[in-house]
Image: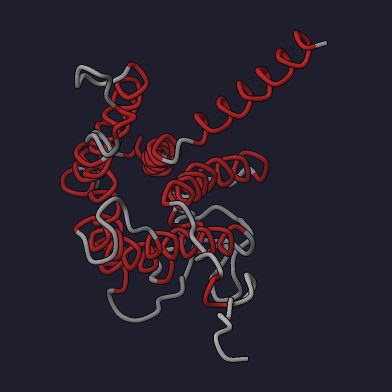
Amino acid sequence: MLGTTHHPSPNTPSNAPPFVISQRFFASLIGVIAFGLPTFLVFGSLVGGCFRNSLSHNYYSSFFGDVFVVSLAAMGLFLFAYRGRDGRGGLEDKLATVAGIAALGVALFPTEGDGLDGKACASRAFVDSVGGVSFELFANVWMLHVAAAVYVFGFLAYYALFNFTKVHSAESVDAHGNLTPAKRHRNRLYRASGIAILGCIALLGLHSWIGHGWTFWHAINATFWIEALALVAFGTSWIVRGRVFDTVLLDSAAKGVVRLTSKVSN
């Protein structure tokens, strides 16, 4: 009818709210995977009695190899999706995207050797379980693995030390422009995580450079434990960045206020 204004249905696609996932959610997922992967591999190695020379050598395990590859691939995909405060096309987005590619590289390009040093252990079908011939995707593929791993760890250290410690929102400062106690605590964790990652990189680099004759290194599976520490530090910083604990505490506090209000009103 003429003169009648058409009002679109509230359920039409044009009025549907956009599907938005918080960047903190992505940060939390990345952190949980990074924290959980070495924890799971350490537990599996303790139970199975078979420590490989490094976390990456779990690629050759019949079961934990799948866990290793899938976890790093998931981490890489979440890094692709992570935009940071700058949004799409910003510096954070670009660095995280390259880190996502590198994480996929660590997962898909195997390191050299099966990492068993002659120990019998369950392995993939294309690997001699007693430490003989190991699968090689193509010649010198381990170089891509190492380069990708170095970039990922370097990216993580940079983010923890120089990005996460910045003030990204008004809630991190008080009325006088000073950092809030919560932000100062988070920054301490970020810096500790970044320093731990850099320390791990330095130790691994030192061994690679001059430590080929260090018999104790493989005897105590030093590379395995150092890489595990680096990933735990990485996971801790990203879990803190995602404010997982903040959310839990705020939810608990809100529930406590509701219960207290209910008691007072009764």
Residue at the image point whose x is 52% and y is 58% from the top: 71
Residue lying at the far bottom in this picture: please name it.
1
- 155 or 149: nearer the eye? 155
Q: Residue at x 59, y 77 (%)?
A: 8
Give how far across and how far down residue 127 sits, in percent: 54, 71
Q: Is residue 136 above or below residue 115?
A: below
Quadrant, the N terminus: bottom right
- Foreground residue among 230 and 217: 230
Q: Is residue 245 left or right of residue 255?
A: left
Across and down, in percent, residue 143 comes to 25, 67
Residue 218 visible to an observer of this rendering? no
Colouring style: secondary structure
Residue that appears at 19% across and 41% down: 206
Q: Is residue 66 left or right of residue 80?
A: right
Q: Residue furthest front?
A: 3
The number of discs equals 0
Which residue corresponds to the image point at 64% horizontal and 72% vertical from the top-left?
11
Which quadrant is home to the C terminus? top right
Question: Where is residue 233 drawn, in percent x and y?
Answer: 38, 36
Instruction: Give residue 183's quadrant in the image.
Output: top left
Which residue extends farthest top? 264
- x then y, percent, for residue 77: 44, 65
